[in-house]
Amino acid sequence: MLQTLLMVIHLIIGVGLIATVLLQPGRSAGISGAISGAGESLFGRQSGMDEFLSKITTYLAVAFMVLSVTIAVLL
């Protein structure tokens, strides 16, 4: 029962992680990408939505990895 619940949560987090990664703009987006990646530090900080998506992606990735290890240990 616990393993099934963890697998369902793992699936939901995986789909959420895929969605947040696909929603983020590419590295070469805008003028900042034209100058070989120096853009964000050169032209200022990220916009609010980009920063939010980056944080959500980080949290989901950590949760995905922790759940992966937990499920591997339980099985």
Image (spheres, rainbow, N blue to C red):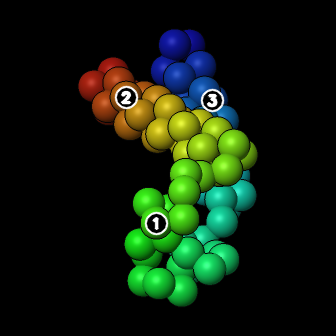
Label 3 SS? helix
Residue drawn where x is 56% and y is 75% of the image: 32
Q: Earlier in the sequence, mark 3 or mark 2?
A: 3
Name which residue type carries label 1.
Answer: Leu
Label 1 secondary element: helix
Please provide percent x and percent y for residue 15: 66, 46
Badge 2 amino acid:
Val
Residue 73 on image: x %, y %: 28, 25
Q: Which residue is mark 1?
A: 42
Q: Quadrant of the C terminus?
A: top left
Q: Pick whichever, 22 or 8, lies toward us.
A: 22
Q: Position of residue 31 (x, y in %)?
A: 62, 80
Q: Say which residue label 3 marks.
A: 8
In the image, is residue 6 above or below residue 44?
Answer: above
* Residue under the image location 50 percent in, 32 percent down: 59
Q: Is residue 19 above or below residue 3?
A: below
Q: Which mark is residue 66?
A: 2
Rate crowding at label 2 as few (under 14), some (14 to 19) or many (20 or more) other CA atoms within 10 Å.
Answer: few
The 10 Å Cα crowd at callout 3, few under 14, some 14 to 19, many 20 or more, is few
The one of 45 and 2 positioned closer to us in this rendering: 45
Measure the alpha-carbon separation of dots 3 and 2: 14 Å
Q: How many angstroms separate mark 3 from mark 1 (CA)?
A: 42 Å
- Single out the mark in the foreground, 3 or 2: 2
Point 32% across, 31% down: residue: 69
Q: Is residue 68 visible?
A: no
Q: Position of residue 57 (x, y in %)?
A: 55, 43
Q: Left or right of 73: which side holds 5?
A: right
The answer to which of marks 1 and 2 sits earlier in the sequence is 1
- Left/right of residue 32 with respect to residue 47 in the rendered view: left
Quarter-wise, where is residue 52 in the image?
top right
The first of marks 3 and 1 along the sequence is 3
